[in-house]
Image: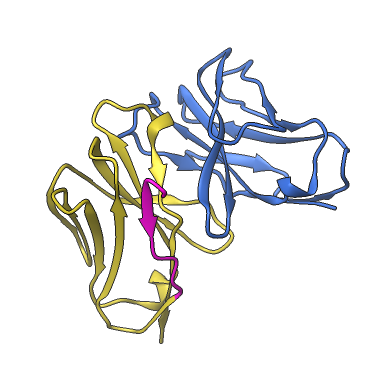
Chain colours: A blue, B yellow
Amino acid sequence: EAQVTQNPRYLITVTGKKLTVTCSQNMNHEYMSWYRQDPGLGLRQIYYSMNVEVTDKGDVPEGYKVSRKEKRNFPLILESPSPNQTSLYFCASSLFGRGADTQYFGPGTRLTVL
Amino acid sequence: QKEVEQDPGPLSVPEGAIVSLNCTYSNSAFQYFMWYRQYSRKGPELLMYTYSSGNKEDGRFTAQVDKSSKYISLFIRDSQPSDSATYLCAMSPLSGSARQLTFGSGTQLTVLP
């Protein structure tokens, strides 16, 4: 089944404790990205990657890191999480990263930073 | 002002009603218009897309674009409880990358049996 998977689905952590949210897609997509979704603000892009070893900042990159060492994986790293990073996070992928391409989203990771 | 404005709702309608969901936008470069549906505790999934102006119909769903007014709509006929979800509009320039894809904040819809 074609899909984007994320782990963990739910995470409660404390300020400053480094964490990684994994994302994997099995569709051989070149483009992958991370969004956060907050009430009233919608989906805001954190980072994106056009292909392996090619990553760039989105609209809200502060406090986040990513890497793209393999085509299928795009982990999101919070080196020192803070309470304002409490949010619902989505990984997404698309075939070539064109605006008209269908974005395939993962099921989401709900992060709470205490 | 946001590039894409969407009434967050919540919108509650009885089963069988016609639902109208709308977005307005300010960037005249937007040419691709999409509607994503997001069920509770799930990621968004593409429902419909249209290019430039006009209507597109798919079963009970009709997407409408009015570029002169910078206004897009999604109509749901004979709404069902299974249509209860958050609906997000999304837009992109003609030759834009996914980096330029802009989402509305979503409208939460509940269809009551």
Residue in the image at 23% along x and 73% along y: B77
Q: Position of residue B29 (x, y in %)?
A: 24, 35
Secondary structure mostly seen in the magenta stretch: loop
Residue range of the region highlighted in magenta in the rendering: B1-10
Q: Position of residue A21 (x, y in %)?
A: 71, 37
- Identify whether B9 is placed above or below B93: below
Give the number of marks.
Answer: 0
Q: Position of residue A12 (x, y in %)?
A: 82, 52
Residue in the image at 27% along x and 82% along y: B17
- Identify whether B80 is placed above or below B55: below
Q: Is residue A110 visible?
A: no
Residue B4 colored in magenta in the image: yes
**Left or right of A89 in this view: A32:** left
- Residue lying farthest to the top in this orientation: A53
Residue in the image at 88% along x and 38% along y: A17
Q: Is residue A24 visible?
A: yes
Q: Position of residue B66 (x, y in %)?
A: 15, 53
**Left or right of A20 in this view: B50:** left
A28 or A11: nearer the viewer: A11
A85 or A108: nearer the viewer: A85
Residue B79 colored in magenta in the image: no
- Quadrant position of the C terminus of chain B in the picture: bottom left
**Left or right of A72 in this view: B96:** left
**Quadrant in which residue A46 is drawn:** top right
- Identify whether B78 is placed above or below A19: below
A108 or B23: nearer the viewer: B23
Residue in the image at 43% along x and 30% along y: B99
- Residue lying farthest to the front in this orientation: B1
**Quadrant in which residue A38 is drawn:** bottom right
